[in-house]
Image (tube, grey):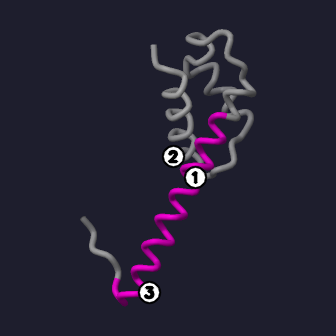
Amino acid sequence: MPKLSEYVEMAANEYLQETGKDELDARWIAEFFQDGGVQDDYPRQDLVAFGELVQKALAKKSERAGKQTRFQLDKIVRFGKPPRKP
């Protein structure tokens, strides 16, 4: 059985891949909660609390992506050329 934190990460990653948004949709998370196995593995887990955890994970991912983008843009501005692709 996955840990609750693993379910949170799975939900956040799946939501970002499917929607590209960082604001969680209530219907989507309710469906994931039920169909993704969270409700079965953690029957005492509250859907609203789980949704808040996923929203927090989405906010962190969005913040990191923004920081990475700003860093890359700063490098371009400073050095005048785009960074190499690995």
Q: Residue at x 56, y 31 (%)?
A: 8
- CA distance separating discs 3 and 2: 30 Å
Residue situated in front as seen by the camera: 56 or 84: 56
For label 3, the residue is 77
Mark 2–mark 1 CB contact (< 8 Å): yes
The residue mark sitting in front, 3 or 1, is 3
Main secondary structure of the magenta stretch:
helix
Q: Which mark is residue 20?
A: 1
Q: Residue at x 35, y 87 (%)?
A: 79
**Direction from residue 85 to residue 54 in the image, left or right:** right
Q: Residue at x 57, y 49 (%)?
A: 60
For label 2, the residue is 17
> What secondary structure is found at the residue carrying circle 3?
helix
Quadrant for the N terminus, please.
top left
- The part of the chain drawn in magenta is 53-81
Q: Could you tell which of marks 3 and 2 lies nearer the N-terminus?
A: 2
Q: Could you tell which of marks 3 and 1 lies nearer the N-terminus?
A: 1
